[in-house]
Amino acid sequence: MLKIAQIGVGYWGPNILRNLVENKRCRVTAAVDLALERRDYVHRLYPAIKVTDSIDDVLQDPETDAIVIATPVASHFDLAMRALEAGKHVLVEKPMARSVAEVEEIGRLADKKKRVAMAGHTFLFNAAVRYVKELIDSGGLGNIRYIYSHRLNLGRIRTDVDALWNFAPHDISIIQYWLNNATPISVVKRGVDFIQKGIDDVVFMNILYPDRIMANIHVSWLDPNKVRSMTVVGSKKMVVYDDVADNKVAIYDKGIDRMAVLGKDMDYDNQRFPAFNYRSGDVLLPKIDFQEPLKVEIDHFIDCIEQGIPCITGIEHAKKVIAILAS
Ligand SMILES: NC(=O)c1ccc[n+]([C@@H]2O[C@H](COP(=O)([O-])OP(=O)(O)OC[C@H]3O[C@@H](n4cnc5c(N)ncnc54)[C@H](O)[C@@H]3O)[C@@H](O)[C@H]2O)c1
C-alpha cells in the first residue's frame, strides 16, 4: 500500500485529504501545514493522522513514498524539488509552477530520480469532460470550429495570483485535453485589476490553434453568478458542458450548411446563389456515470507510480498549460 503525505490543508487541501483517507490503495502518513489552525483542523477530523509544521518530517520519513502539494503556487516549485530530491513521487496542485522553466526543472529531476511528477488538473478526471473528449475524438462533432468557456463567480479572491492564474489553468487544461495538446499559434489576453492593484479580477484570453480553431476563456471572481460552462461548436454538432447543471453535457444537433439554391447537391463553392440550411435537430442529454474527480485523480496518481503508466497531467501537459498562461 502506497504511503502518502500531504503538504497544505487550507481551502482546497481538505478535499484532497478526505480522498486520500478514503482511498483503500494508500495510507496517509502525515499532514503538514504552517498554520496551527489548519493542523488543529486535521487533528480534530482525523486524530490518527500525524500533523506537523515541518516538511522535513515527511521528506526524511523513509515510510513516505509520495507527497501531495496543496500550498499556494509560489511554493510549488521549491516544495516539489525538495520532495523529488528526497526520492518522493509528487502530485502538485495546479498550476504546477510559475514558469515553463520551473516545470521543466521539476520534470528533469523527476526523470533523474525515476519518480512521478503529476499536476493536479482535476478536470481531466471529470467524467463530463472525458465524455466530451470521446465525442470530439470519435468525430461526433465534426471539425471543431471554436470553444469558449466562462468560469465566473463572486469570489473567492486570492491575494497571491490573479484570476487568470487561479481559474484559467482549468479551462486551458480542458481545452488542451480536448485538442490533443495542440500548440497554439497565438495567445492574446486582457485583464483588469479593480480590487487589488496588480492582481486582475477579470481576464479575457483568446487562443488561436492550427486549423483555425479558436478558443476564448473568460475568468472572473467579480461576477454576480457562479458560471462554469464551456461550449464547443463543431461542423456537425455543438456541445455545452455546464459543470453546475444537473445535466452536465448537452449535445445539440445544430449547424448551418451552405448550399447552392440551384441544383440538388450541396455546392460549397458556388458563390453566386448562396443559401443557408439551418439544421436544428434534437438535443441529447447523455447519462454520464459520475465519480468524484479527485478520487479518479488520486487513483491515476497511484496507477502512474505502481504501474509506470504515463500521467495524463504529467510534465508535458503542465508545461503547455503554463506556457499558455504565461504568454
Ligand atoms: N484543483 C482544484 O480544483 C483547485 C481548487 C482550489 C485550489 N486549488 C489549488 O490548491 C492550492 C492551494 O489552494 P488553497 O485555495 O487551498 O490555498 P490556501 O491558501 O487556502 O491554503 C494553503 C495552505 O497551505 C499552507 N502552507 C503554505 N505554505 C506552506 C508550506 N511551505 N508548508 C506547509 N504548509 C504551507 C497554508 O498554511 C494554508 O493552510 C493552489 O495551488 C490552488 O491553485 C486547486
Image (spheres, rainbow, N blue to C red):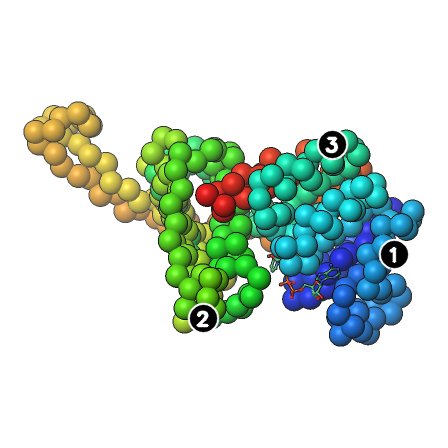
Counting residues from the N terminus, which is met first, the one under dot 3 or under dot 1?
1
On screen, 180 above or below 51?
A: above
Numbered disc 1: secondary structure = helix
- Residue type at mark 2: give it: Ile
Q: Which mark is residue 99?
A: none
Residue at mark 2 to residue at mark 1: CA–CA distance? 39 Å
| Residue sitting at the far right | 62
Answer yes or no: disc 1 within 8 Å of ligand 1: no
Counting residues from the N terminus, which is met first, the one under dot 2 or under dot 3?
3
Q: Is residue 64 left or right of residue 275?
A: right
Pointer 2 with pointer 1, Cβ within 8 A? no
Q: Count residues near mark 2 (Cα–Cα under 10 Å), then give few for <14, some for 14-19, many for 20+.
A: few
Per the image, the residue denoted by label 2 is: 195
Residue 261: quarter of image = top left
Numbered disc 3: secondary structure = helix
Residue at mark 3 to residue at mark 1: CA–CA distance? 24 Å
Please tell me in which quarter of the rendered image ligand 1 is found: bottom right
Q: Count residues near mark 1 (Cα–Cα under 10 Å), then give few for <14, some for 14-19, many for 20+.
A: some
Q: Position of residue 226 (x, y in %)?
A: 46, 66
Q: Position of residue 217 (x, y in %)?
A: 41, 51
Q: Is residue 200 visible?
A: yes
Q: Position of residue 292 (x, y in %)?
A: 64, 56
- Residue type at mark 1: give it: Asp
Per the image, the residue denoted by label 1 is: 57
Q: Which mark is residue 111?
A: 3
As rendered, which of 5 and 234 lies closer to the eye? Answer: 5
On screen, 98 above or below 242?
A: above
Q: Looking at the image, which residue is at 24% across and 40% down? A: 256
- Residue type at mark 3: give it: Asp
As rendered, which of 165 and 167 lies closer to the eye? Answer: 165
